[in-house]
């Protein structure tokens, strides 16, 4: 997706040096395997300046306002007026007028926006790296460490830089230019069942999906492709587009996975090919076998593209070759099947937290007490994410899914792909989510209602029972990966940044298979089949009753590796564009997590209205 940075200066106009700095930042955001000349858009106008790196056809401008993504609204919708309408869509919006500047997220913050305010400047960006580069300094936020350990993400609200804040789902921040204050506006996410029959719920959901899919009519011929799996989500998008006859000429689908997956019955890859054939859609299979590049290059690119926000490496072991290829063959964006129709059955608060990626270190035997022992900040779950009085486990599960897992984990995964192409998530429209939130627990659990709708509209092609990509545990047990992780964890940089005791603790849990051999795939497949045959409620009961839930040692080491790599990158990479060479060398030798704050008074914030 196009990457955006927007700057508003409080007192004086910005000049040509700002243009130069923004262009340099855009260049830094381009992945190292992109060979085509990137199309950046930079504008400096008075106190406002913005840059869009790798601009695509899903970028709209109106005056000094910007929209990245698309709206599921009428073409003449006025999205560009601060504090005006809050449209349905898959987007990030920055809108400006003489008195106010507003940043707006969509229903689940599918495009993460970070922001910064001090007494001199306001900055908003889809990239943490871009803001750090513009400021010319980095202040490490140690609060990300326990969240990365327990979830493999940055957690509910933190950034690697403690000065940056993250815009939450279905929210906006309004900068009052005269008073120089920010006001945060958020719409609460509430699940409350309405008294409709099951048929009425089904009809309402079907109508909401139809409405959203019709909005794609003007865009699906602009270089958008649909990644197609053998499951329900992407199938729903394709089938509803086919039912509405909204597919433009040349529209196509793609599937990726291990080359061997195509010949495996019930696999995502094989089912997707059959589904595309049954609907007469042009389809392409893209092999996802591991790149021949050095493993360090593959992992470094994964971390750079995702800005270290998530640890899900397994889908990117081709070194981002699929995404590079899509970008360089003119694909502007992909239509993702991320959704919020409901989740798996849960039986305890632990299984809710585990499923929504809200587990804390205290939930795992090998992480209990880690923050106290090694001097990291306490891991705090925001009050808004705690279970409410009289809230069912199922309602809490899906509220967390909408307000936390989607904007934290799924948006982070979109960030990785978005370094090459834009990402559109039609199943997360406000129209659809408002219906889902009015459905009873029993029809959301296991996505029961949604699955019934898809089976009614789709062809009689079986659903997939196996994934087409490799296991993350197999990848992290490879000899070359273990050696790479161990080298970073035993480095002086790691000891200086996170403490010798902590990195030694993590290193002790790092394991490689005997003689460098990997787990036999047949054993993994057998375990997967056995697990699938056990009812969900039994599996959850076994998890709840189990003593000593643990985070895999290799996965834990990889999570710490990500933190170290991002700390190193953000501590040094910004200097080339922000400072003279002499200052750069001086800061590189002195920077650590206690770096000096940017001069200036703390920003002013107003209390959000009740």
Image: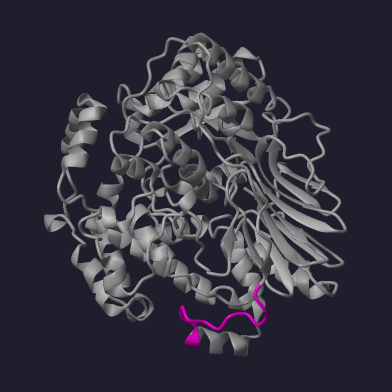
Residue 557, given in percent of the width and then of the height, sits at 29, 62
Q: Main secondary structure of the magenta part?
A: loop
- Residue 594 sits inside the magenta stretch: yes
Asked if 278 appears above or below 347 in the picture, the reply is above
Residue placed most toward the observer, 334 or 337: 337
Quarter-of-image position of residue 425 = top right
Residue 211, given in percent of the width and then of the height, sits at 66, 21
The magenta region covers 589-602
Residue placed most toward the observer, 439 or 329: 439
> Which residue corresponds to the image point at 37% horizontal and 43% vertical from the top-left?
289
> Which residue corresponds to the image point at 87% horizontal and 67% vertical from the top-left?
46
Q: How is the image coloured?
A: one colour
Q: Is residue 420 left or right of residue 516?
A: right
> Which residue corresponds to the image point at 15% horizontal and 37% vertical from the top-left?
523
Quarter-of-image position of residue 378 = bottom left
Residue 473, given in percent of the width and then of the height, sits at 26, 48
């Amino acid at each position: 997706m196009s990457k955006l940075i927007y700057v508003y200066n409080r007192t004086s106009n910005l000049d040509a040096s700002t243009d130069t700095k923004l262009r340099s930042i855009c260049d830094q955001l381009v992945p190292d395997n992109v060979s085509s000349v990137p199309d950046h858009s930079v504008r400096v106008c008075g106190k406002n300046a913005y840059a869009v790196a790798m601009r695509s056809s899903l970028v709209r401008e109106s005056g000094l306002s910007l929209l990245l993504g698309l709206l599921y609204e009428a073409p003449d919708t006025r999205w560009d007026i601060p504090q005006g309408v809050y449209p349905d869509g898959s987007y990030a919006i920055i809108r400006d007028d003489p008195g106010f500047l507003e940043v707006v997220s969509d229903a689940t913050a599918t495009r993460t926006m970070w922001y910064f305010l001090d007494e001199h400047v306001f900055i908003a960006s889809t990239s943490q790296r871009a803001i750090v580069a513009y400021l010319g300094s980095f202040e490490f936020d140690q609060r990300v460490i326990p969240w990365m350990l327990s979830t493999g993400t940055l957690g509910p609200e933190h950034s690697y830089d403690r000065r940056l804040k993250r815009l939450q789902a279905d929210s906006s921040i309004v900068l009052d230019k005269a008073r120089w204050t920010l006001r945060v506006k958020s719409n609460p996410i509430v699940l409350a069942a309405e008294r409709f029959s099951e048929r009425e719920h089904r009809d309402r959901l079907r109508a909401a999906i139809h409405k959203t899919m019709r909005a794609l009519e003007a865009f699906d011929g602009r270089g958008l492709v649909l990644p197609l799996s053998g499951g329900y989500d992407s199938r729903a998008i394709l089938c509803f587009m086919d039912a509405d006859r909204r597919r433009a000429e040349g529209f196509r689908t793609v599937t990726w996975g291990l080359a061997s997956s195509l010949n495996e019955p019930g696999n995502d890859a094989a089912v997707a090919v059959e589904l595309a054939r049954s609907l007469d859609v042009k389809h392409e299979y893209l092999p996802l076998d591991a790149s021949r590049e050095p493993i360090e290059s593959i992992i470094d690119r994964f971390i750079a593209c995702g800005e270290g926000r998530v640890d899900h490496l397994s889908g990117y072991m081709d070194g981002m070759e699929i995404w590079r290829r899509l970008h360089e063959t003119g694909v502007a964006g992909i239509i993702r099947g991320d959704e919020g129709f409901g989740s798996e059955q849960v039986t305890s608060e632990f299984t809710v937290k585990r499923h929504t990626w809200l587990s804390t270190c205290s939930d795992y035997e090998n992480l209990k007490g880690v923050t106290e022992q090694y001097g990291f900040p306490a891991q705090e779950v925001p009050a808004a994410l705690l279970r409410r009085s009289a809230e069912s486990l199922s309602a809490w599960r899906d509220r967390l899914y909408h307000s936390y897992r989607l904007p934290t984990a799924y948006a982070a995964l979109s960030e990785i792909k978005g370094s090459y192409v834009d990402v559109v998530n039609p199943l997360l429209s406000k129209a659809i989510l408002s219906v889902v939130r009015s459905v009873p627990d029993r029809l959301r659990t296991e996505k029961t209602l949604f699955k019934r709708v898809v089976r009614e509209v789709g062809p009689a092609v079986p659903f997939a029972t196996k994934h087409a990509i490799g296991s993350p545990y197999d990848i992290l047990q490879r000899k070359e990966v273990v050696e790479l992780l161990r080298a970073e964890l035993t480095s002086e940089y790691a000891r200086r940044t996170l403490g010798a005791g902590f990195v030694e603790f993590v290193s002790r849990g790092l394991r490689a298979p005997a003689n460098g051999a990997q787990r036999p795939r047949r054993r993994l497949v057998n375990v997967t089949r056995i697990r699938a045959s056990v009812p969900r409620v039994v599996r959850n009961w076994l998890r709840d009753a189990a003593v000593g839930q643990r985070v895999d040692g290799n996965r834990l080491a990889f999570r710490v590796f990500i933190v170290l790599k991002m700390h190193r990158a953000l501590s040094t990479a910004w200097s080339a564009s922000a400072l003279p060479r002499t200052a750069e060398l001086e800061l590189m030798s002195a920077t650590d997590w206690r770096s000096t704050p940017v001069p200036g008074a703390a920003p002013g914030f107003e209390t959000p209205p009740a």
